[in-house]
Amino acid sequence: MALASCDVRGRIAYDAGLVPLADGGLVREPRPDELIAAPAGSMPMVLPQRHPLTTIGPIVGRTAMAVALPAGYTRLLLPAYAAERGAPALPLFGYTFACSIGDRLFVAAMQTDESEDWQPRTFAEGELQALVAARLAREPGNRVLRQVALCSVEYGCFTAQNVFLERGEAALPVSPRCNARCIGCISELDPDAGMPSPQTRIAEEATARDLARVAIHHLERVEDGIVSFGQGCEGEPLLRPTALVRAIEKIRAKRVNGTVNLNTNGSRPAMLERCIDAGLDAVRISLNSFRASVYAAYYRPIGYGLADVLDSVRLARRRGVRVSLNLLTHPGVTDDEEEVAATESFLRDCPVALVQTRTLNIDPARYFEAVGRPCAPVGMRRAIETMRGFTAVGNFTHTH
């Protein structure tokens, strides 16, 4: 195992005489069972004004690097580095430890799922734009279509693109408002966050009519399709329960096939129950931790807490709705001994259909500053295997 790092121009170099260190909450050498060859679709990244840490200390003449993993993989370790004074905050990406073994790039990761619908897509020049333009021409006044068109072309969002490709899970953004102030929010960050949001949050409230029209069109063409409220370009959909209920009722009045799904922070159990009464089939509830203090430090919730989120999980499960957890994972936090115990305790009492591990895209130093470093990290692989003792673990939406 050798150091993989970058020069001032961002060119990757392997230094066979240097043994790199990784950060798993505690800085240490990675274990062989934590490393795999970098999968297709991996994206190397330069970490500016940060020097890689090795067993002999920081290498000042080199710049630390990381790798962003493709969908279907869960990272196990972070890059370890020494930051220069005044180094800027890292943007919202998933930073995974990388090294070289035998002149090949390796990463600290494990494959946790696979899905053809989420493989990187290659479009002929203008192909996606033509599909978008044709659909918008049929419904020029539909605000939902206008938003998912933007997300498809500008942000490369797969669920938005699915609306126009007529496949898989299709996006239905609904709410510009949110009752959480996540420190890693991709659509709205505090002015003092030190970086811009990578996306612009939707500005308009979609009508139930527009939402239903997009959903019905999708389910007419995709027999086992999924239509999903609650996307990365918006706030919290449960803040618009009336629009959600009316849209679900309109969808189910026309189509009985497919799955109507809600992505939510689970903050309002009573509003979630209204959606279930209207015909909601599945819910994916996001959280970063089963410990109230760690949850609050990241989500910074307004008017609710982790107890409400977990009540929503229990409610949906009791009502027979398919429940997935959108678990924002981070080495050193997800696998902290206390976190693993809290996770096991909840899943034992309330097993869900699926835990979807999501890489928490954030500067690791910023996240550790907010939630604290672990006392006893046990390793991400062990944390995931503990979850698998009670439920399925993956990365993509599954309907069965």
Image: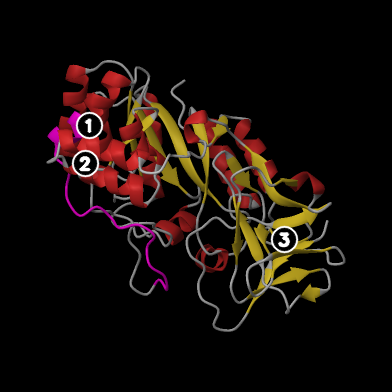
Q: CA distance from mark 1 to mark 2?
A: 8 Å
Choose mark 2 or mark 3, whichever is in front. 2
Can residue 234 be seen in the rendering of this structure?
yes
Residue situated furthest right in the rendering = 17
Q: Quadrant of residue 135?
A: top left
Q: Which residues are magenta?
A: 193-213
Residue type indicated by callout 2: Val
Label 3, on which residue?
A: 22
Residue at the location (78% across, 44% down)?
33
Can residue 236 be seen in the rendering of this structure?
no
SS of the residue at dot 1?
Answer: helix
Residue at the location (75% across, 57% down)?
99
State yes or no: discs 2 and 3 in contact (Cβ < 8 Å). Answer: no
Label 1, on which residue?
A: 214
Which disc number belongs to residue 187?
Answer: none
Upstream in the sequence, badge 1 or badge 2?
2
Vertical position of residue 253 compared to residue 30: above or below: above
251 vs 314, nearest the viewer: 251
> Does 145 sit left or right of 184 as displayed?
left
Upstream in the sequence, badge 2 or badge 3?
3
Which disc number belongs to residue 144?
Answer: 2
Magenta stretch secondary structure, dominant: loop
Residue type indicated by callout 3: Ala
Q: CA distance from mark 2 to mark 3?
A: 43 Å
Residue situated furthest front in the rendering = 125
State yes or no: discs 3 and 1 in contact (Cβ < 8 Å). Answer: no
